[in-house]
């Protein structure tokens, strides 16, 4: 028990700033929406449309960087400190190429927006906004690379602070570019795109300078250089990063499709769905921090070849995440009739949202289990089988079950959410047993 308490303490210490950093990234989007909304409904609708499409692609790039932190943590555990800088540079090399590919994809997707049958003014704004945002993919992914490097070394505070301060810079640039202040012409929605892009470049430069100039990090040789590249290490980074990115893509895409299915039921269920999903997303940000911390803690013990430490670090992350999500679920149930009133006054929406919050409460534990399970398995570089099971759980179990319950059994939005609960539960239980099995084999 003493050992578990130590692991829980270390996981919390690492997870808290990681979760705050994640929240910092999310808040930039919230601030953008709030400030763009004052320009007009068309700008807000275009921003919503583009951000949904953009995030689906961005999550692939973000996932590719996930290979860096477990490999860094393992090398640190093995006391191969110079190898940490080698992994970082190989990760930056791979992700730089991948980010350019994603930038071209997003830029090209802007030409397909007219096919989505949106209002003409929304379409016109969305095309321009998406083209501008595509330029921000490169700095976003490079920032994630250096952030994963620091988190792999259990130094999460610098990227967290930069992400939080970036919100202030982003708000100032939004005020300047969107509304036309400080001598600039008012650019509307395009201004928000330029503000986000500039902010992301400054964030990346700031973190890069910290990594290069920090005396504490000199031991790890983090200076950028791409000489003597090791093809085996490149393949290893891709072999961990690509399945990780695809796993998150499948998850985001499944919830997006579930939202589309709710939309088939009408605007009232869709509004209720948005309230419940928004609340579930807030708790998920905390769990994502624990998942990343679990990756690092497990990876470090794995590098030390301390298998008992691997198990305790992994199960500590799983226990912590499920405990937090259980508490979150209790709050959802207790205040299910109150929370929706903070969003809207429509009694029909409030009634459906309150019922959806009961389902959301049920899958909180399942969501915590799958998120932390993915993280701790990544710490021992086990990513391919979880990817296949994620596809099966989300798309062959969750979505079909949601459709059957929602439309065939006429349970509506509740049935669709029950489908998500089934998919998440199946995945979470599998990952728990997978981690136990893999570590016992070790």
Image (cartoon, rainbow, N blue to C red):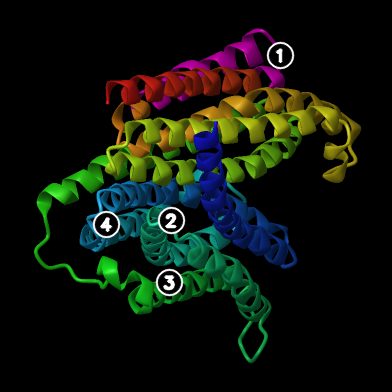
**Left or right of 387 on screen, residue 421:** right
Q: Look at mark 1 in the image and give the residue it sits on.
A: 411
> Height in image: 291 above or below 208?
above
What secondary structure is found at the residue carrying circle 4? helix
**Which mark is on residue 91?**
4
Residues at marks 4 and 3, CA–CA distance in whole angstroms: 16 Å
Question: Dot 4, crowdedness within 10 Å: few (<14), some or many (≥20)?
Answer: many
Visible in this render: residue 296? yes
Asked whether the beta carbons under mark 3 and mark 1 sit within 8 Å of each other, the answer is no
Which of the two discs, 4 and 3, labels the residue nearer the N terminus? 4
**Which of disc 2 and disc 4 is earlier in sequence?**
4
Report the residue at 25% width, 69% height from top: 221
Q: Which sits earlier in the primary sequence, circle 3 or circle 1?
A: 3
CA gap, disc 2 to disc 1? 46 Å
Q: What is the magenta range?
A: 388-415
State the residue lying farthest toward the bottom: 183
Front position in the image: 241 or 327: 327
| Label 2: few (<14), some (14–19) or many (≥20) C-alpha neighbours in 10 Å | many
Mark 3 or mark 1: which is in front? 3
Residue matched to label 2 = 154
The secondary structure type at the circle numbered 2 is loop
Between label 2 and label 1, give the one nearer the viewer: 2
State left or right for residue 194 relative to residue 36: left
């Amino acid at each position: 028990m003493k050992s578990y308490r130590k692991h829980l303490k270390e996981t919390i210490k690492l997870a808290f700033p990681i979760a705050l950093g994640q929240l910092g990234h999310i808040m930039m989007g919230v601030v953008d929406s709030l400030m763009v909304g004052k320009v007009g409904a068309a700008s807000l609708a275009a921003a919503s449309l583009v951000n949904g499409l953009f995030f689906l692609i961005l999550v692939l790039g973000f996932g590719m960087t996930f290979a860096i932190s477990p490999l860094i943590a393992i090398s640190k555990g093995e006391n191969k400190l110079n190898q940490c800088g080698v992994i970082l540079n190989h990760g930056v090399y791979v992700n730089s190429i991948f980010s350019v590919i994603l930038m071209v994809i997003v830029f090209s997707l802007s030409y397909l927006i007219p096919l989505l049958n949106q209002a003409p003014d929304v379409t016109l704004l969305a095309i321009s906004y998406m083209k501008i945002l595509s330029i921000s993919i490169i700095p976003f992914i490079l920032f994630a690379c250096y952030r994963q490097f620091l988190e792999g070394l259990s130094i999460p505070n610098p990227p967290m602070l930069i992400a939080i301060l970036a919100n202030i810079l982003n708000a100032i640039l939004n005020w300047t570019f969107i509304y036309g202040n400080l001598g600039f012409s008012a650019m509307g929605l395009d201004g928000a795109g330029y503000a986000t892009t500039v902010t992301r470049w400054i964030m990346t430069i700031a973190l890069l300078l910290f990594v290069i100039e920090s005396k504490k990090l000199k031991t790890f040789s983090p200076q950028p250089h791409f000489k003597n590249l090791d093809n085996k290490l490149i393949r290893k980074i891709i072999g961990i990063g690509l399945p990780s990115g695809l796993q998150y893509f499948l998850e985001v895409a499944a919830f997006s499709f579930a939202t589309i299915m709710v939309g088939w039921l009408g605007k009232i269920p869709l509004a209720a769905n948005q309230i419940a999903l928004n609340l579930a997303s807030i708790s998920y940000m905390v769990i994502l921090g624990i998942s990343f911390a679990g990756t690092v803690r497990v990876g470090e013990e794995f590098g030390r070849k301390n298998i008992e430490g691997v198990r305790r670090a992994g199960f500590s992350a799983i226990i912590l995440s499920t405990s937090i999500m259980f508490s979150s679920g209790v709050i959802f149930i207790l205040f299910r009739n109150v929370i929706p009133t903070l969003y809207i006054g429509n009694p029909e929406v409030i009634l459906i949202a309150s019922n959806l919050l009961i389902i959301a409460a049920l899958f909180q534990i399942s969501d915590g289990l799958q998120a932390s399970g993915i993280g701790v398995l990544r710490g021992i570089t086990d990513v391919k089988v979880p990817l296949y099971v994620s596809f099966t759980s989300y798309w062959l179990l969750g979505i079909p079950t949601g459709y059957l319950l929602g439309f065939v059994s006429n349970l509506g939005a509740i049935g669709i959410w029950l489908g998500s609960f089934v998919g998440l539960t199946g995945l979470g239980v599998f990952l728990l047993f997978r981690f136990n099995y893999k570590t016992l084999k070790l």
